[in-house]
Amino acid sequence: MFMQFKRRLFTYHDDMTDIDIANPKLRALYDLWNAKRGTRQAPPRSDFSFEDLRPWFGHLMLLDCVGNNEYRYRLYGTELVSLFGFDLTGKGVSDAIGQIGDKPLDEYRQVVRIGAPVYASRISPSAREYLQVDKLALPLMEGGEVTKILGALYRSDKVDA
């Protein structure tokens, strides 16, 4: 079976307003991240309040960068659990490759390596089927290094209001 996917990698520069993000919810999350970033390469987690992130609840994931190119899901949204059929909260990304494939690990490593957002539109496995998804992964930095990744994911064929 042949599967197509496209991935857009962002690099850091002073004016990121030209980034093409197809999903309006992900675009809005990117705009919030960019506003919180200001003149810095990336904002810290502490810059985001509960209320700031409310529009994306259920679709959010928050990952801790735990070293050696490994990441652990601190939060895996309820809509993602419903969509994919499994909960990854508390699990390492490497430990979940059997469920999610290897693309997420590559994307998170890229976020950390370049210290900038990664947007992907691709096929993703779920417990029931393969789904077309749009995903945004955003670096959160402390002391000049990426310590967390804030992400959100939506089905490409369905944009929630």
Image (spheres, rainbow, N blue to C red):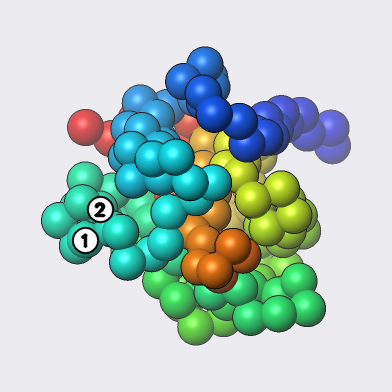
List the single residue furthest toward the right.
1
- Horizontal side of residue 147 vs 155, given as left or right: right
Q: Residue at x 38, y 56 (%)?
A: 60
Q: Residue at x 71, y 48 (%)?
A: 114
Compared across the picture, whether 86 is left or right of 48 comes to right
Please, what secondary structure does the residue beneath circle 1 have?
loop
Residue linked to disc 1: 49
Q: Which amino acid, mark 1?
A: Ser
Quadrant in which the C terminus appears: top left
Image quarter of residue 126: bottom right
Q: Residues within 10 Å of mark 1 (few under 14, many from 20)?
A: few
Q: Nearer the viewer, residue 62 or 134?
A: 62
In x, y percent, where is residue 156? 48, 31
Q: Residue at x 30, y 59 (%)?
A: 47
1 vs 2, front mark:
1
Give how far apart the Cα atoms at labels 1 and 2 are: 7 Å
Residue drawn at the location 33% of the way across and 45% of the way down: 36
* CB-based contact (under 8 Å), mark 1 and mark 2: yes
Q: Residue furthest top?
A: 18
Q: Which residue is mark 2?
A: 53
Q: Does 7 sit above or below residue 147?
A: above
Relative to 140, is 33 on the left or the right? left
Q: Quadrant of the N terminus?
A: top right
Q: Is residue 1 visible?
A: yes
Q: Is residue 29 visible?
A: no
